[in-house]
Amino acid sequence: MLPARHRLRTAADFAAAVRGSGGARSGGRLLVVHGRRAAPPARVGFVVSKAVGGAVVRNRTKRVLRHLVAARLTRLPDECHLVVRANPAAAAATTPELAAELDRALDAVLRRLDQGSRTPAGVPS
């Protein structure tokens, strides 16, 4: 289970993570992960629309994604906010497939956020 303090809850938090300046995004066939630097602690939100399927399918997909992200919380920097959006193909994906795509997208987003946080030598921050 994803601890309450690590959950994005408000629409403003989701919007900031998805559309905020200085953010990063990586996606694939199953998932899209949006991330940006923000105030600690690391927080994660999930978007699983009706395009993914009916209520049972959407809730199952969210449960699997929450479980996968909870296991990866230690990889997230404390000042990172993420939104994980499931694409319609995620409904038919297995848990290992979702895990592999999540790992790939998460690595790419964290790498881009890390590169964006560095300032070139001689340039004041």
Image (cartoon, rainbow, N blue to C red):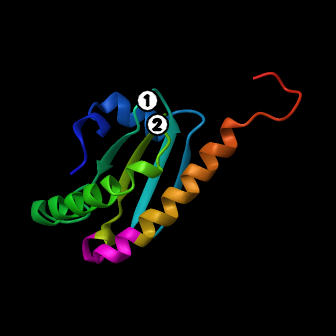
Above or below, 114 against 16 in this view is below
Q: Magenta stretch: residue 17 in it? A: no
Q: How packed is label 1: few (under 14 Cα within 10 Å), some, or many (20 or more)? A: few
Nearer-the-camera pick, 43 or 50: 43
Element assignment for label 2: loop
Q: Is residue 22 visible?
A: yes
> In the image, which residues are magenta?
91-99
Residue 48 in which image quadrant: bottom left
56 vs 91, left or right, is left
Magenta segment, prevailing SS (helix, strand or loop) = helix
Q: Magenta stretch: residue 96 in it? A: yes
Nearer-the-camera pick, 50 or 117: 117
Q: Which residue is mark 2?
A: 78
Above or below, 50 against 39 in this view is below
Q: Residue 22: horizontal and vertical position, in percent?
A: 60, 35
Q: How packed is label 2: few (under 14 Cα within 10 Å), some, or many (20 or more)? A: some
What type is the residue that disc 2 sits on? Asp
53 vs 102, left or right, is left
